[in-house]
Image (cartoon, coloured by chain):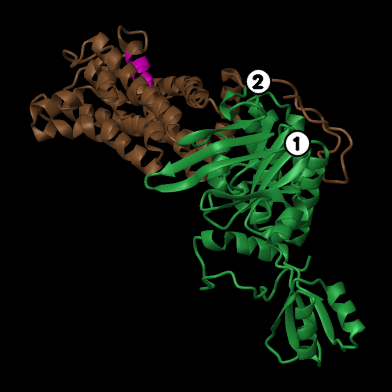
Amino acid sequence: MSTPPTSAPTGSAAPAGSAGTGSGRVSLLRVVRSEWTKLASLRSTWMLLLVFVVLGVGIATLAGWGSAQSIEATEAGVPTAGGPPGGLGAEALAASILSTTSLATLLLGVLGALVMSGEYATGTMTATLTAVPRRWPVLVAKAVLLVLVLTPLALVVSGLALLVGESFLPASATLGLGDEGVLAKVVAYAAAMVVTALLGLGLAAVLRSTAGSITVLVVVVFLAPGLVPLFGVDWLTTAAQYVPATAAGALGVTAGDPVLSTPEAVLTLVGWALVPLVAGIVVLQRRDA
Amino acid sequence: MIEARGLTKRYGAKTAVDDLSFTVRPGSVTGFLGPNGAGKSTTMRLLLGLDRPSAGEALVNGRRYREHRAPLREVGALLEARAVHPGRSARAHLVALARTEGVPVRRVDEVLDLVGLTAVARKRVGGFSLGMGQRLGMATALLGDPATVMLDEPVNGLDPDGVLWIRTLLRGLAAEGRAVLVSSHLMSEMALTADHLVVVGRGRLLADTTVAELVARTQNGSVDVRSPQAQRLAALLEGAGAVATPGDQPDVLEVRGADAPRIGELAAQHGVVLHGLHERQTSLEEAYMALTRDSREYRTDGQGSAGTAPAPAGAPR
């Protein structure tokens, strides 16, 4: 249908002096720009990202400093039975420092969930889907945007976590970014961060609830890697190896044999990012908004 | 232009919208009336493709809403006024929507100005009053300069100035040739705004009519007559083919089958003194109440039948 006449406004009621509304159509690129406006216009986004950086680098700093203390104690002649962390090699130290970024990683998952569940909670989804009635571009655009915004940030946090954490350690226990497998590990942890954000987004698209999504995130990101193996149930322990944190831990330089092979680890990361997202798209297309 | 054809929406055993068909034409304001829970909001969600109909279809400007590739320019909708993230500014909310189909940002400032929110455009929506929220909702609806406008209860929470503003705005939009669908549970408000009425109750179409027709349809056409010679007048009226029943006072008659001029002339011919002659007008509000009496979901009046008693505070026409 053609646009209605915009002239002859009656009184103050009509959209007087219309500047025109152009003639564009909805495109994925436009929806990405729209989602950027939404993301950037919320104070909570910036708060979460700030806390992400501070926690990610901060906890790694503490871990590095703690390890340095243990090493000093060991060298001062306190006998050690090879117990951690004083007796750990450089590879194990690097891995342990990077693994402390999991709390920060969880925050990205929360951000990913909020990007979707926040729209349901506030009713903004009605306006969003009225503007993009085909629906799927909304979720795809949110995912694209999260990847674009978070990838550089995650790389910086992961790299800084390692470098700052190691700065307390003696040179003999330190690996540089140039050493074999180190950069790969930094990238792997950054990837796990972005994957977790996408996981949060996908979960929220399926569950439509902030609380529900965060609960699942905490289980997958936080509890599964550390807690589940303690149950001593074989299949649960095996399952717990296929979480993003373990996958990241298996990539790049490792102290011993990695739990997962490189293809397994990469597939695990990709799976956690994509499977919930695809499920989210199916739910978004089918269910009433 | 909005066309609903056999639109039906069931939620489990409950049917929210039941085989609803109606058309909203360009150049007029169509009032969408019904008691709370009549299915008005659900119908609007079906029209916008937010909910999927169980049966039937809804066409907006000739297509299903989902098929439009620049939907904001086709249809502007205000569903829930406060459905905006409280942490976002009014302007950011509108800019985000505008970007989805390349509506220029200056149009955002234009609609903000139009609804009078320029001063608070960069304030967070969380601090808005209900009325400001409604104005932001109007700005959202008008953002794409759409040919069809759909508003769910736009006057809720507005002060008298705001109500008048909405009324003028809606009339203006229709005068520009747009199709305007506006829902309300207040007949008095629709009487002042709408040309056409679609009345629903319990999801069903009760009337698809004009304001004048609706009143005529439910007009009971009785006349209250007050006369010290009521009994004599009653006999004369009976003789003239009308029905006169005694009112609640001895000098009052309720007359059907003869209009006020006829009764007056008859009385004058026979020298009967009249103290009062009052044609009982059914107000639009009463007409609406009579129409929806059986389909109101929550009632407090406890009246089973229609009766003829006028509502005590019927809105004057």
* Residue B66 visible in the current orientation: yes
State which quarter of the image contains the N terminus of chain A. top right
- The stretch drawn in magenta includes residue B184: no
Look at the image and give the colour of chain B. Answer: green
Q: Which residue occupies the foreground of this view, A131 or A88?
A: A131
Q: Which residue occupies the foreground of this view, A114 or A185?
A: A114
Please state the horizontal and vertical placement of residue A212, each as a whole percent of the image: 34, 41
Please state the horizontal and vertical placement of residue A36, each as a whole percent of the image: 57, 28
Question: Label 2 belongs to which residue?
Answer: A25
Name the element at disc 1. loop
Number of other residues with Cα within 10 Å of mark 2, as a class: few under 14, some 14 to 19, many 20 or more: some
Question: Label 1 belongs to which residue?
Answer: B26
Number of other residues with Cα within 10 Å of mark 1, as a class: few under 14, some 14 to 19, many 20 or more: many
| The magenta segment | A185-191
Q: Amino acid at mark 1?
A: Pro
Please state the horizontal and vertical placement of residue B148, each as a whole percent of the image: 70, 35
* Residue B17 vertical placement versus A155 (above, below): below
Name the element at disc 2. loop
Q: Which residue occupies the foreground of this view, B279 or B94?
A: B279
Q: Which residue occupies the foreground of this view, A23 or B193?
A: B193
Look at the image and give the colour of chain A. Answer: brown
